[in-house]
Amino acid sequence: MKLNKAILTMVCGLSILTLVGCSHAVRISAYPQKQMIARGNLTASDIEQNIRAAVERNTRAGWYVEKSDQNKVTAGFTHGRHYLQVTYFINGSQVYSQITDSRNLNQRGDVIHKNAMAWKLRLDKYVYVQLAKAR
């Protein structure tokens, strides 16, 4: 009888931990879309090169440039088994970022693991600082 009670207590405890673990997800739309307007004298090629430079400075953190052209720069991030892809879209002098792919980050529609948003926002900061300093 005591063994059954112990097993039931353990199963209930694991169920609670599973439910608490689900709270690590956040809504992507809850984070305001950051957009930057680069200086007027920067060409699309200049903007692309500055975004690439910001991503490449973050290789130790796990970021790398997957592909780029004058319309967008796609950055990949790996951390263990987790993968996140962020694309920086370039439209004239406007730049904005968006999560375009992920693996093992529990992404379902507009919901993703909170670490993914933290990683994206950190890279956004580096990219936008780089663009603000660009001449």
Image (cartoon, helix red, strand yellow):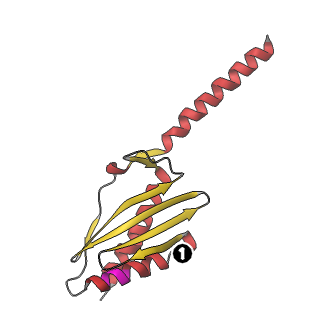
Main SS of residues in magenta: helix
Say which residue appears at 46% left-offset and 75% top-offset. Answer: 65
Q: Position of residue 47 (x, y in %)?
A: 31, 81
Q: Which residue is mark 1?
A: 59
Say which residue appears at 29% left-offset and 75% top-offset. Answer: 71
Residue type of the residue flagged with mark 1: Thr
Assign the N terminus to one quadrant of the image: top right
Quadrant of the image occupied by residue 128: bottom left
Residue 105 relative to residue 80: left or right: left
Residue 87 relative to residue 106: left or right: left
Q: Does the magenta segment cover residue 48? A: yes
User: What is the number of callouts on the image?
Assistant: 1
Q: Position of residue 80 (x, y in %)?
A: 62, 60
In depth, the one of 126 and 72 nearer the eye is: 72
Residue 12 in the image: above or below residue 113:
above
In depth, the one of 135 and 100 nearer the eye is: 100
Assign the C terminus to one quadrant of the image: bottom left
Q: Position of residue 38 (x, y in %)?
A: 25, 78
Say which residue appears at 42% left-offset and 75% top-offset. Answer: 67
Say which residue appears at 48% left-offset and 67% top-offset. Answer: 76
Which residue in the rendered view is the most extreme toward the top? 1
In depth, the one of 71 and 49 nearer the eye is: 71
Quadrant of the image occupied by residue 54: bottom left
Q: Position of residue 35 (x, y in %)?
A: 27, 66
Highlighted magenta segment, given as a residue range: 46-50
Residue 22 in the image: above or below residue 16:
below
Q: Does the magenta segment cover residue 7? A: no
Q: Dot 1 lies on which element? A: helix
